[in-house]
Image: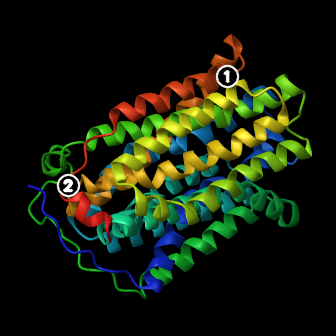
């Protein structure tokens, strides 16, 4: 049975290290994207890649970019289970070491011109990224109510920052110092996080010393009612947002003749990230002051659906920007609410497993929508955004009833 325990406040130094690890989990993918583009798709490509036709190089690039998230989705829940079962700090340290090896291998691969080593490094790094949900688990395991929502909001801020600014940073590093530079940057971050992790003390973990870490039935049996619907909400919300996000590259050029190379497009994409980060920093704790978690989640999901509808029907670029600001606020605000709801329904000893499953749902959603959006656009330009409206409405129906203990935590 699920048992609650008092939350242990985390020191600032511990929070800094944990958020650094969470940042690395996302930045390791986004910062290195420009390097892979340079290596596979430009005149400065690897010598082996230059011998391939451009179409084959594009396929190779797509394989590298999609296979790493798939491997992460497949193995991260099991790695997190081992962390829950034995020791989160030790497993995080091992993941950081694996990630460091994964960043070092492409550096050597570029020197020797090996596509195989480049592939292997990317795959190994995807396994190392399992440190991200384990760090999230420590945050969620040691917080409750509004404090938990605030910490989860900062998780989303860090991830959004990596997604929004990582490619630009990687591009700048590649332009100044060559294709190896983004990998060096991530390697340094991984080693610094590993060093700092060994200098801090984490709160005592509720470990399960006699349980099979490969078992997924045991944590489900300990969870409270509503965990699976919460996982479905994570997937549906991320899938819906990603449908629109992927749709932007088709929508702006074809509806208003705004190219992806234009200043408008670049500022628009940057604006999404800035609006979401500002919303995550300012609003979750405020809304939970006035609304209970379940009510807040349903309300925000409803307005996210309204925002998506506005994005689908706006007639001009200016009105589209206004609708984007409103929608981005609602989408950003929903993340800490449904992650908190998910965390509340998993036992303290299974937080790593729960956060890993949520990460897998996020990865699966974004992996699927890249292909699906392109197919939907061929049918109707705004169809991906229209389906996103439906997705958020379905998510509202899946929001589970409040937990009996939730009202006590929300005041904290």
Q: Is residue 90 left or right of residue 115?
A: left
Q: Nearer the viewer, residue 17 or 400?
A: 400
Relative to 315, does residue 73 appear above or below in the rendering? below
Q: Nearer the viewer, residue 61 or 237?
A: 237
Q: How is the image coloured?
A: rainbow
Q: Which mark is residue 13?
A: none
Q: Nearer the viewer, mark 2 or mark 1?
A: 1
Residue 395, by quadrant, is: top left
Relative to 103, does residue 221 appear above or below in the rendering? above
Residue carrying label 2: 213
- Number of numbered callouts drawn: 2
Give coordinates of residue 267: x percent, y percent: 83, 50
Mark 2 vs mark 1: which is more N-terminal? 2
Any part of residue 57 in sight: no
Q: Secondary structure at mark 2?
A: loop
The residue carrying pointer 1 sits among few (fewer than 14), some (14 to 19) or many (20 or more) residues within 10 Å by Cα, namely some
Give coordinates of residue 258: x percent, y percent: 89, 33
Give coordinates of residue 188: x percent, y percent: 63, 74
What's the residue at 42%, 28% (across, down)? 394
Residue carrying label 1: 374
Q: Is residue 222 left or right of residue 164?
A: left
Residue 50, by quadrant, is: top right
Q: Secondary structure at mark 1?
A: helix
For the C terminus, give its image quadrant: bottom left
Relative to 386, does residue 39 appear above or below in the rendering? below
Q: Nearer the viewer, residue 374 or 151?
A: 151
Q: Is residue 77 left or right of residue 166?
A: left
For the residues marked 2 and 1, what is the alpha-carbon distance in whole angstroms? 39 Å
């Amino acid at each position: 049975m699920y048992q609650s325990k008092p939350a242990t406040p985390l020191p600032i130094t511990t929070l800094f290290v944990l958020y650094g690890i969470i940042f690395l989990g996302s930045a390791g993918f986004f910062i290195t994207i420009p390097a892979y583009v340079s290596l596979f798709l430009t005149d400065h490509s690897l010598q082996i890649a230059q011998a391939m036709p451009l179409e084959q190089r594009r396929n190779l690039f797509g394989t590298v970019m999609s296979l790493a998230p798939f491997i992460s989705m497949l193995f991260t829940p099991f790695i997190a289970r081992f962390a829950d079962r034995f020791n989160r700090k030790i497993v995080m340290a091992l993941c950081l070491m694996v990630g460091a090896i994964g960043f070092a291998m492409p550096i050597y691969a570029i020197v020797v011109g090996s596509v195989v080593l480049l592939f292997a490094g990317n795959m190994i790094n995807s396994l190392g990224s399992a440190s991200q949900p384990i760090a999230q688990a420590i945050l969620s395991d040691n917080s409750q109510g509004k404090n938990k929502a605030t910490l989860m909001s900062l998780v989303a801020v860090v991830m959004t920052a990596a997604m929004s600014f990582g490619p630009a940073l990687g591009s700048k590093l590649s332009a100044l110092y060559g294709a190896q530079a983004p990998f060096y940057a991530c390697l340094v971050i991984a080693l610094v996080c590993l060093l700092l992790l060994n200098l801090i003390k984490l709160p005592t973990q509720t470990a399960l010393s006699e349980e099979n870490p490969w078992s997924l039935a045991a944590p489900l049996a300990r969870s409270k009612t509503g965990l699976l619907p919460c996982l479905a909400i994570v997937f549906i919300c991320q899938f819906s947002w990603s449908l629109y996000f992927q749709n932007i590259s088709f929508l702006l050029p074809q509806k208003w003749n705004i190219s992806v190379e234009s200043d408008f497009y670049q500022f628009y994409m940057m604006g999404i990230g800035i609006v979401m980060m500002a919303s995550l920093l300012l609003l979750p704790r405020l809304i939970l002051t006035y609304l209970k978690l379940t009510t807040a989640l349903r309300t925000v999901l409803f307005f996210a659906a309204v925002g998506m509808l506005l994005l689908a029907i706006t007639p001009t670029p200016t009105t589209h920007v206004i609708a984007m600001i409103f929608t981005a606020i609602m989408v950003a605000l929903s993340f800490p609410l449904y992650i908190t709801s998910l965390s509340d329904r998993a036992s303290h000893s299974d937080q790593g497993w729960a956060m890993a499953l949520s990460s897998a749902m996020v990865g699966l959603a974004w992996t699927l929508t890249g292909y699906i959006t392109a197919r939907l656009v061929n049918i109707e330009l705004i169809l991906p955004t229209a389906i996103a409206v439906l997705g958020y409405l379905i998510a509202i129906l899946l929001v589970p009833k409040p937990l009996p203990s939730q009202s006590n935590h929300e005041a904290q």
